Amino acid sequence: MAFWNNKNASTSVATPAPVSSDAKSLSAASPRRGWFTVFESFAGAWQRNVEVKPELALAYHAVFSCVTLISSDIAKLRARIVEETPDGIWVEKKRHALKKLLRKPNDIQTAIQFWENYFISKLTTGNTYVLKRRSPDNKVLSLHVLNPMLVQVLVSPQGAVFYQLNVDDVSGLTSSVTVPASEIIHDRFNCFFHPLVGLSPIYASGLAAKQGLTIQQHSDRFFGNNALPSGIISVPGAIEEEDAAAIKKSWEDGYSRENSGKLAVLADGMEFKALAIPAQSAQLIEQLRWTAEVVCSTFHVPPYKIGIGTLPTYNNIQALNVEYYSQCLQTLIESAEDCMDDGLGFGESIGVEFNVDVLLRMDGMTMATRLKEEVGAGIRKPNEARKVMNLPAVEGGDTPYLQQQNYSLSALNKRDAREDPFATAKPENKPEILPLAESDANAKAIAAFATKAVEIFKDAA
């Protein structure tokens, strides 16, 4: 086992340094060598070689559907770098040194393939380990999701965390190496037994998956025999063991497998009795549906999402997607964002964010109605609404608009500060009383104007 040395890091994989004395005191975070658990269908089943292997559980359609549904739904959300503005608004940062890393995490995977691999690892094993490959100047060049079966968490007596990585050609690890926690992005959930070891939902649904597979295998054998059940042939009286073996062989050769369904003739009082329980009596379909619902409950996936049961009758796709997002995807998404922020060294005002608008997208009519109301209320700018609908900006659309009868809060506050803000009191119309001297002067002026007017009319006549 070698120890990671950042000083010897190259663009491929860091050159392992010799094992230090401290490395010998490292102990595994869990007594298990790997993170896969042997699921016992009953106490003592493992000793009797009755076990539920994770690979077997993944073959059950409900487990497979839940894992692929969740991983693909999150992978299709574009990961972007966002920054907080002085106003407290998070906006996408158009230029950043790590933006290219999110678009192309490594040489062999696209962004969607990387995130699918990321969440498949987490859902099936409870842990995702991402190795950061660095340049000579210590910058992160690429991200690689490691095989969780080739990684083991180690803890020193002082509490420092290391990761032992075994040979993994896909990730460029040509030899076993031990790296510090700073070189690994470790995303985990369901840490029931150790804070550094996650647990897959398959831990709780493994038995249901095994039961579902058993039901399907039984149905396969039953219909492979042309839906004819097994049984026994009863013969009156006693017969020799050799005769019984001959009758059994003759029946199997003549009326089983490809010969099943043929007409049989029984003589000497022999009688055929079916032994298999009919599917209706065994509630085969109900049991199969129940096992699938148990799997869905452990992954927090609504059963209708994977074709189990019926779709809710109310016609509100957005409400269904919001429910699916809040109870199933939100924790996984925000956990991945936190791990990326911490692993890539982002601060409090910048980080990685998945664009969930794609997931919560509404139908066209509902979206148009919502945008119309937001623009009319001055919440969105017209060009912002047009951008949501993938339309180009127009001149004059970069400012919010409101109708003229709407008043600002400051104007309303000034009105309310008046003694009579709503002018409910009626004004008194009292005649203006002029001073005596001023009244006499006005009277003389009026009289002079009248006299002059009379003279003008006389001259005109």
Image: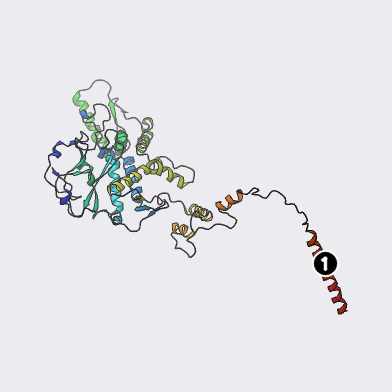
Residue sitting nearer the eye, 97 or 222: 97
Q: How many marks on residues? A: 1
Residue 175, can we see it? yes
Looking at the picture, the colour scheme in use is rainbow
Where is residue 239 drawn, in percent x and y? Answer: 22, 22
Q: Secondary structure at mark 1?
A: helix
- Determine whether, in the image, residue 172 is placed left or right of residue 318: left
Q: Could you say which is closer to the camera, residue 423 or residue 458?
A: 458
Name the residue: 82% across, 65% down.
443
- Say left or right for 188 vs 407: left
When the figure is inspected, residue 81 is found, relative to residue 305, above or below; the finding is below
Q: Position of residue 236 (x, y in %)?
A: 28, 22
Kindly indicate the quadrant of the structure image that contains residue 204.
top left
Seen in the picture, residue 29 relative to 6 is either above or below; the reply is above
Q: Residue at x 21, y 51 (%)?
A: 133
Considering only vertical position in the picture, is 40 above or below 440? Answer: above
Res 213 seen here: no
Percent coordinates x, y for residue 331 in the rendering = 36, 42
Disc 1 packing (10 Å; few <14; some 14–19; many ≥20): few
Q: Residue at x 20, y 28 (%)?
A: 47
Amino acid type shown at disc 1: Lys
Rendered position, 167 above or below 269: below
User: As drawn, which residue projects farthest toward the top?
Assistant: 237
Going by the picture, which residue comes out furthest to the bottom?
A: 460
Per the image, the residue denoted by label 1 is 444
Provide residue 62's location: percent of width, then percent of height: 34, 40
In the rendered image, the residue lying farthest to the left is 18
Q: Nearer the viewer, residue 148 or 29?
A: 29
- The C terminus: image quadrant: bottom right
